[in-house]
Image (cartoon, rainbow, N blue to C red):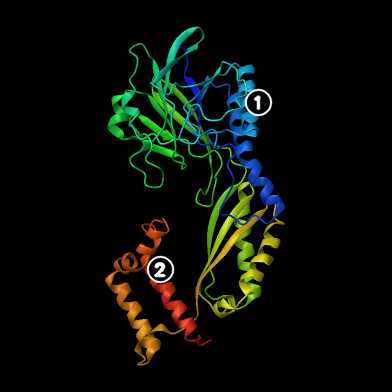
């Protein structure tokens, strides 16, 4: 091989995505969220040009919708033109959000920006210094709900020095994503690719070491569950195998933090604790949208439960955090605190309060999972939600706290 093959692996940009499930009442937050997917895409293209990669592999869901709105198409057209000017081809395997043939308005793209065929696995040859050294293999979705195992159709060409597979797929049966183009380790190994550039799972990371199979993850976190750094991978492959470098591209990070209020005795001290937590979140160089969970046994528990007070605390905390550089927006604040009560004393009492504490003890001792499945899971099932991620013990503790609050049990301090 004359030199290593270098390329950029990108996926799940979701241009045109609308952010949902977040309180973005501040105009700066709204504007940042609208721009974020486009800015992430631009950063990835900047990176490809700056590093002079040999090609860009996009593993599905470049667009968020099959109809591909015109703003998103303009963004892709501009990016494709920049790559073409730099002599960098781009190869796109369309996914469930942007299957082949979606939409009506189609802006012209340079020939160097190519989508893989949807009726077969297509091989595109890449030459370096006049010599063909790499085969890039991919297949696009013909329809959104692609449930066939497409990875099983990939196979290395005998003359390839380097083989790269590009696919939007659910590896290993992830329950957090739709079971589209499902595949397993045996399928990827059988193809004899040197590297699998995967899309569909929004968490970046390696899912298989041999051959190396990597999810680029979402270029920009799209909801409060997609926390932490989001970006793309620079990949280099030589005779020693592939090496990857993760590069962050997101404009806004989603985060979550827990604050232990044990020992906090006043609202002033609470405000200071929240401000410290937000200052810690602001250190990553990008604006942050975060959810805070307040927990611990604290004298301010009853104050936080008082009608309207939490909203006032949140409003003030937001004002404080938005003055940071970069700013932090508190999407919501969840109270999981408890009063400073003597549970052992209540446990020994013979009244109804004692019965409540002992009943909770029983569920915790026996394992609360069965209780959750019997009482809560059916309701969640009707709502189309999964009960698998619930912390059953936490639910019992929170129920105990709510009952003691309703019964007027107060702390000793």
Residue at coordinates 38% horizontally, 32% vertically from top-left?
A: 213
Mark 2 nearby-residue class (10 Å; few <14, some 14–19, many ≥20): few
Task: Using residue 215 as the reference point, say whether residue 172 is left or right of it.
Answer: left
Position of residue 251 measured from the top left corner of the image (x, y, whole percent):
62, 42
User: Do we see residue 29 in this rendering?
Assistant: yes
Residue 165 sits above or below residue 276 on the image: above
Q: CA distance from mark 1 to mark 2?
A: 50 Å
**Residue 1: quadrant of the picture:** top left
User: Do we see residue 326 in this rendering?
Assistant: no
Position of residue 12 measured from the top left corner of the image (x, y, whole percent):
51, 36
Residue 128 sits above or below residue 247 on the image: above
Instruction: Give the label on residue 78, or none.
Output: 1
Q: Are marks 1 and 2 in contact (CB under 8 Å)?
A: no
Question: Camera-side residue: 245 or 295?
Answer: 295
Q: Which residue matches tag 2? A: 394
Position of residue 69 measured from the top left corner of the image (x, y, whole percent):
61, 34
Residue lying at the far top of the rendered structure: 130
- Tell me which numbered mark, 1 or 2, is placed earlier along the sequence: 1
Position of residue 374 measured from the top left corner of the image (x, y, whole percent):
31, 67
Residue 373 sits above or below residue 222 on the image: below
């Amino acid at each position: 091989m004359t030199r290593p093959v270098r390329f950029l692996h990108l996926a799940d940009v979701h241009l045109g995505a609308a952010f949902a499930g977040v309180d973005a009442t501040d105009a700066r937050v709204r504007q940042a969220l609208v721009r974020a997917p486009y800015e992430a895409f631009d950063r990835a293209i900047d990176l490809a040009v700056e590093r002079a990669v040999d090609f860009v592999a996009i593993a599905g869901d470049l667009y968020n919708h099959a109809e591909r709105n015109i703003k998103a198409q303009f963004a892709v057209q501009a990016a494709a033109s920049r790559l073409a000017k730099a002599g960098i081809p781009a190869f796109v395997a369309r996914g469930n959000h942007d299957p082949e043939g979606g939409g009506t308005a189609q802006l012209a793209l340079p020939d160097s920006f190519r989508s893989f065929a949807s009726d077969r696995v297509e091989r595109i040859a890449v030459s370096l210094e006049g010599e063909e050294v790499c085969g890039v293999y991919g297949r696009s979705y013909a329809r959104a709900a692609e449930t066939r195992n497409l990875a099983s159709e990939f196979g290395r060409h005998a003359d390839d020095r380097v083989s790269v597979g590009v696919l939007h797929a659910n590896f290993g049966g992830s329950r957090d994503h739709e079971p589209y183009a499902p595949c397993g380790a045996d399928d990827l190994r059988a193809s004899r690719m040197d590297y699998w550039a995967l899309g569909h799972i929004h968490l970046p990371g390696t899912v298989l070491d041999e051959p190396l199979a990597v999810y680029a993850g979402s270029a920009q976190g799209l909801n409060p569950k997609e926390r932490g750094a989001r970006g793309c991978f620079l990949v280099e492959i030589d005779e020693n195998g592939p090496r990857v470098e993760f590069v962050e591209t997101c404009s806004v990070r989603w985060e979550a933090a827990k604050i232990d209020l044990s020992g906090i005795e006043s609202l002033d001290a609470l405000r200071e604790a929240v401000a410290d937590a937000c200052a810690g979140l602001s250190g990553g160089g990008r604006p942050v949208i975060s959810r805070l969970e307040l927990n611990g046994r604290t004298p301010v528990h009853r104050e936080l439960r008082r009608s309207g007070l939490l909203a006032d605390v949140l409003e003030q905390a937001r004002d404080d955090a938005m003055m940071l550089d970069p700013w932090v927006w508190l999407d919501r604040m969840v109270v999981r605190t408890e009063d400073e009560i003597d549970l052992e004393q209540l446990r020994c009492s013979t009244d109804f309060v004692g019965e409540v504490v002992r009943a909770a003890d029983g569920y915790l001792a026996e394992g609360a999972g069965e209780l959750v499945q019997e009482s809560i899971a059916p309701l969640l099932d009707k709502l189309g939600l999964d009960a698998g991620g619930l912390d059953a013990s936490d639910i019992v503790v929170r129920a105990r706290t709510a009952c003691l609050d309703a019964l007027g049990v107060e702390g000793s301090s």
